[in-house]
Image: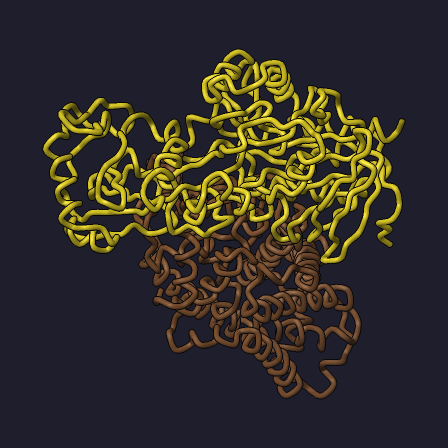
Amino acid sequence: MLDLDKAWDVVVLGGGNAALCAAITARQSGAQSVLVVESAPRAFRGGNSRHTRNLRAMHDKPTGVLTEQYLEDEYWDDLLRVTAGNTDEALARMTIRASAGVFGFMQECGVRFQPSLTGTLNLSRTNAFFLGGGKALVNAYYVTAEKLGITVLYDSEALELHMQDGSVRSVDITYRGFPRTITARAVVAASGGFQANLDWMRQHWGDAVDNFVIRGTPYNRGRVLKNLLDQGVAAIGDPTQCHAVALDARAPKFDGGITTRLDSVPFSIVVNRNGDRFYDEGEDVWPKRYAIWGRLIAQQPDQIAYSICDARAFQYFMPSVYPAYRADTLGELATMMKLDPAKVAATVAAFNAAAGHGNFDNSRLDGCHTEGLTPPKTNWARAIETGPFYGYPLRPGITFTYLGVRVNERAQVLMEDGRPAGNLFASGEIMAGNILGKGYLAGFGMTIGTVFGRLAGEGAARHARN
Amino acid sequence: MRETDAIAEARREMEICNACRYCEGFCAVFPAMELHREFAAGDLGYLANLCHNCRGCYYACQYAPPHEWGINLPRTFAEVRAESYEHYAWPPRFAQAFQRNGLVVALATALGFALVLGLGLLFTAPGALSTARPVLPGAFYAVIPLWIMQVVALATAGFTLYALARGFRNYWAEAGIPGVGPRAIARALHDIFTLRNLGGAGHGCNDGSERFSMTRRYLHHAMFYGFLLCFVATTAGFIDHSFLGLAAPYPFFSLPVLAGTLGGIGLLIGTVGLFAMKLIDDPMPAARRMLAPDIALLVLLALIAGTGLELLLLRATNMMGLLLCVHLGFVLALFVILPYSKMVHGLYRAGALLRAAIERDLPRAAGGE
């Protein structure tokens, strides 16, 4: 019989990778009763982790699916570059070092790995791919949790944490639609960011959010985050910023995951609603640019853009989940995408006249560029002239938000006065902003979630036992 | 393959999978998928027959139902496979046996049983079926004359083999590719005999839940190798008799009986086990229309194995005549219905594995985030 009224040793708010790592570690570290409160229904459990596919890990020699080596300083340099310094070196280096030691835990929990996926060879050295992706990882953690006797509540959302003297006394939740109050000796907040809370997003982005796609779960509404920040917990990260990438505009509003991405931009030109180009499409390889394009498109009228290429370029990027618009002439293509055909024709003509300086090579930065064109295209600038022509509509897709709660190296949540909360820990996206305050490094979110999930679970169990 | 709803659904799902590729490590289907940007119906028939129904991709899928995209490859591919059995069957007029296949196989089972038993009663001396005989050479033929056994066996086996060969030819013409060589054949045989693709890259299938288990793979091995051993036993018996002049029944320590006994036990364990798993399986990734055909065939195979073992145990008693008729009736049913039963999955699966083995050396398109 489920007795929700008892005093739990550890209550974990959230149900993704960071939450499960915390719950499992807490149980393994001696917590007798562990409760996981997951707002999603069982079928959609796992937060954004269900859409992930790998974890970035330090290693000093080839291990399992990871090739060569990836040492602390290189990892740190990569992080420093993408965050432009919006990070905490001590916490970051601690996380990086700990990432080398998570595989034993993960494999004991039934997480399996596979060689890096086709088209991701650039990640085979740094990132370990989950066999079957993030949902398979989440499944493995839930199976483990079940074996360990951890109680999981689905369709149950944490509403309010009652804090007193820097400690959480109880948590109000809805349990399958009915209000309940849970008491716990220690609490782990692992409930993600607020990117699925459109009202909150609207405060910073205005009505442009109506044209945003939320790539991940619709259940990251930031309720716990907001509640904690309202009660004197220290905030970290720019509240107005989020990680945005360029996606197919036809993607579902939520939960489209990775498949709605488009890799066509470097081999295309991109125009806005008015048929004008607005940025150098060939600035760098796509893995280094897709996140910039989310922001660029968000700044265009109606937050929409169109990638246009010809039959020669079509073979150079991954197939997309939505079929390309396809037409024998550029005019027809423009009409299909509700663009002004004359304007598109003029933009392409200007591009073609300026393009082709250098030898095209899709496999590297080829330096094949435009001359006398604003904005320029600095690589892969080959004329768009061989029909049929292909087009994709693009919108900004939001991966996660940066605002979070401040933590220390033991995953303890810090209050505004700098002291740690008595029994409150945090892991995952809700605290990732401490380390990843800007930009993104593939697979690093899962690293933070796993490392801090383990720390939070350990700390919570220790607190509960004492 | 014709453009059907199942084909359209398989194409829709493959186009989503091809943009995701998270399941690449599970089995041969996904690397094979990645060689395409567009999916012709014949290619979808090939991919569906390459799927071993381990369900790894279903439980791992971020887009599985109730997600609006509703990706459910095990079910969709099972539907396409069922259509492919019908589409490639020879002669075409018999193809409709696949439409209500559970019923057809069950009727064949009943008819085979009734026919041989009836003929046994009609054409033997009164009481011959219930006479206990010493286990001496020729004892079986007192029940059913040798020449009848030989004629019926050769005729049914000949027709079955021919029908299977024609079916395979139809399939390969649409779903096959050139390049069959010793290397590809060796790879395909390895995949067939190990069921590598039922392994979830070494961790087993999802038998009914997110948990991984080797149960299905091992049960299928028991059934498959049991069946092969029974086939060895039958062939050895045929050779013993036809060329060495040794008449059945054979002593326990002879190739036909030893292989038959071991095979029968394996077949029985495999079929009963797989049947039991059907009862507790998650219905979501399963195709309803394949349930009856699957169960009908499992039951028929279990009946053959069970009655064969019983015949061995009781061959010195007055049950022998009756059991021989019953056993041979079920064997006859299997041979007659084989090209129109779930048994054909092995043929098309083998063909798919052969194509996948050829394709493994083809260059892959680059791309990706």
Q: Is residue B240 visible?
A: no
Q: Is residue B74 left or right of residue A307?
A: right
Residue A237, given in percent of the width and then of the height, sits at 56, 27
Residue at 57 percent of width and 33 percent of height: A113
Residue A410, given in percent of the width and then of the height, sits at 72, 21
- Residue at position x 47%, y 34% from top? A243
Q: Nearer the viewer, residue A164 or A213?
A: A164
Q: Position of residue A163 (x, y in %)?
A: 78, 35
Query: What shade has chain A been given?
Result: yellow
Report the side of B325 relative to B166 (left or right): right
Could you tell me if residue A195 is visible in this image? Answer: yes
* Among the 4 quarters of the image, the one containing residue A29: top right
The tint of chain B in the picture is brown
Q: Residue at x 69, y 66 (%)?
A: B308
Q: Is residue B47 above or below residue A141?
A: below
Instruction: Locate the C terminus of chain B by quadrant.
Output: top left
Q: Nearer the viewer, residue A55 or B213?
A: A55
Judge by depth and name the residue closer to the eye, A176 or A384. A176
* Residue A260, image x, y percentages: 42, 45
Question: Hey, which residue is sitting farthest top in the picture?
Answer: A73
Residue B266 lies in quadrant? bottom right
